[in-house]
Amino acid sequence: MAAPDPRVGRLKRRPEFLAVAGTRRKHVAPGLILQVRRHDERQRPAPGEPPIRLGLTASRKVGNAVVRNRARRRLREAARQILTAHAAPGHDFVLVARAATAERPWTELVGDLTAALKRLGLWRDASKSEVPKSEANGGPNAVTPNGGTGNGSGGGEAGA
């Protein structure tokens, strides 16, 4: 088994997961749900810890223990490939497994995570030092060019 990536920390305690879910900033895709929370004064990594933290969860709705563990392993690997290179630092991420996670084709699962980061404005190009769209537009509640808010709670097709 590979060692955990030193650039991504872990969310371990229930209050950390609840804080991320409490922001209600998420993207729903067929293979996963991505929930995001920007670090603030109350909950942030200690100095010297990674600027990105990740939590994984799979409920019993996903399947039995074998299926849930497989779903979490797949989400962990997708996060290792995508979040370490492309996620904006200074955020906590929670990946929630769905019923299709364990059987979804790998390229589509990675595509779901990529699309979620882009939709939430947290994608950054690995080759450039780019400011995330939500920060460039004045924060998570700034109005986006399509008229919605940058926090994912705005109009229409926001993956509900």
Image: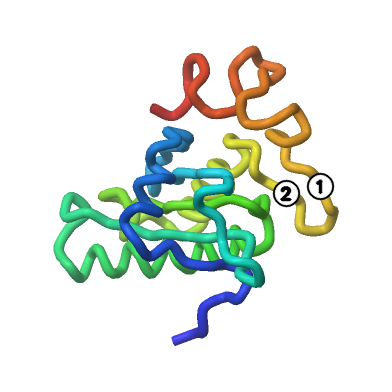
Quarter occupied by the C terminus:
top left
- Answer few, some or many: residues within 10 Å of disc 2's Cα (few below 14, many 20 plus, some between 14 and 19): many
- Left/right placement of residue 139 relative to residue 83 reads right
Position of residue 131 measured from the top left corner of the image (x, y, whole percent)? 79, 43
- Left/right placement of residue 80 relative to residue 121 reads left
Q: Are marks 1 and 2 in contact (CB under 8 Å)?
A: yes
- Disc 1: which residue: 130
Residue located 74% across and 28% down the image: 138
Position of residue 52 measured from the top left corner of the image (x, y, whole percent)? 59, 59
- From this view, report whether residue 55 is shown above or below residue 139: below
Residue located 48% across and 23% down the image: 153
- From this view, report whether residue 93 is shown above or below residue 115: below
Q: Which mark is residue 124?
A: 2
Q: Nearer the viewer, residue 111 or 143?
A: 143
In the picture as drawn, the residue positioned furthest to the right comes out as 128
Q: Nearer the viewer, residue 60 or 40?
A: 40
Q: SS for tag 2? A: loop
Q: Quadrant of residue 140?
A: top right
- Answer few, some or many: residues within 10 Å of disc 1's Cα (few below 14, many 20 plus, some between 14 and 19): few
Position of residue 114 measured from the top left corner of the image (x, y, whole percent)? 58, 48
Amino acid identity at mark 2 = Arg
- Left/right placement of residue 56 relative to residue 92 reads left
